[in-house]
């Protein structure tokens, strides 16, 4: 890491405490902060654990995908890992949804399971990629789906590649902007710190 990038990330984390985990796109982009007007997001932040209320909200296809992403983000992460994806699958499906089951569930459920898995075990985000890629295939105009997949791919990438993953989404004018501007800014303001490593 360059000294300038280290300094920028240090001050970013200093002034926005509680969100940074050394060079971790998934844990340093609290998009749920842009959705704190939603009662269910506030409940998720306070709880941090999947329950029937959260699961039913996430499974309901009438709820917008960005609000689902905000709820998942609000449930958060833990250094020792979480089991929110497992709890979600047990509540909704009565079993775990493995990679071989991906085609049998909806695109939105694949998104939900994928993002939950990514935050549950953010040291090994590759486990989430198949679910999110399947969601992306069927929701191929959703900014929310594309940017979350980009963050997951960026998690274990080198700094320049991390920036390229998200910047490709930032620059994609064909996507439906189904994520609040404030949430996009939260992602951009952190990820732009990686840009200099492409020089």
Image (tube, rainbow, N blue to C red):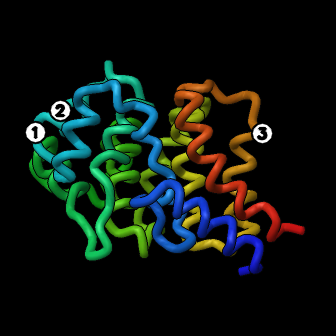
N-terminal of the pair, mark 1 or mark 3, is 1
The quadrant of the rendering that contains the N terminus is bottom right
Which of labels 2 and 3 is toward the front? Answer: 3
Residue at (25, 55) in percent of width and height: 85
Q: Is 194 situated left or right of 66 in this image?
A: right
| Location of mark 2 (residue) | 56
Q: Are marks 2 and 1 in contact (CB under 8 Å)?
A: yes
How far apart marks 2 and 1 lie (CA) works out to 6 Å
Question: Where in the figure is residue 34, as x and y percent of width and height?
Answer: 45, 34
| SS for dot 2 | helix
Tell me if residue 152 can be seen. no
How far apart marks 2 and 3 lie (CA) works out to 33 Å
Q: Quadrant of residue 178?
A: top right
Question: Where in the figure is residue 97, as x and y percent of width and height?
Answer: 25, 55
Badge number at residue 37: none
How many residues crowd around disc 3 within 10 Å: few (fewer than 14), some, or many (20 or more)? Answer: few
How many residues crowd around disc 2 within 10 Å: few (fewer than 14), some, or many (20 or more)? Answer: few
| Location of mark 3 (residue) | 171
Q: Quadrant of residue 93?
A: top left
Question: Where in the figure is residue 114, as x and y percent of width and height?
Answer: 39, 53
Residue at (72, 55) in percent of width and height: 192
How many residues crowd around disc 1 within 10 Å: few (fewer than 14), some, or many (20 or more)? Answer: few
N-terminal of the pair, mark 2 or mark 3, is 2
Question: Where in the figure is residue 107, as x and y percent of width and height?
Answer: 41, 37
Q: Is 152 situated left or right of 106 in this image?
A: right
Q: Quadrant of residue 164?
A: bottom right
Q: Are marks 2 and 3 in contact (CB under 8 Å)?
A: no
Residue at (67, 51) in percent of width and height: 166
| Location of mark 1 (residue) | 52
Q: Nearer the viewer, residue 156 or 44?
A: 44
């Amino acid at each position: 890491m360059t000294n300038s990038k280290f300094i920028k990330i240090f001050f970013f984390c200093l002034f926005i405490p509680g969100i940074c985990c050394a060079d971790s796109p998934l844990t340093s982009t609290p998009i749920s902060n842009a959705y704190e007007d939603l009662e269910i997001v506030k409940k998720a932040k306070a709880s941090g654990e999947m329950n029937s209320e959260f699961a039913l909200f996430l499974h309901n296809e009438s709820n917008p995908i960005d609000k689902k992403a905000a709820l998942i983000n609000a449930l958060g992460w833990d250094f020792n890992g979480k089991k929110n994806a497992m709890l979600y699958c047990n509540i909704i499906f009565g079993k775990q949804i493995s990679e071989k089951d991906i085609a049998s569930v909806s695109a939105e459920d694949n998104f939900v399971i994928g993002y939950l898995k990514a935050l549950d075990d953010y040291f090994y985000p590759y486990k989430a990629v198949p679910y999110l890629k399947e969601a992306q295939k069927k929701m191929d105009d959703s900014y929310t789906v594309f940017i979350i997949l980009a963050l997951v791919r960026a998690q274990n990438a080198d700094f320049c590649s991390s920036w390229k993953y998200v910047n490709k989404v930032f620059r994609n004018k064909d996507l439906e902007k189904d994520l609040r501007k404030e949430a996009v800014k939260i992602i951009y303001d952190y990820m732009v710190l990686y840009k200099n490593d492409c020089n």
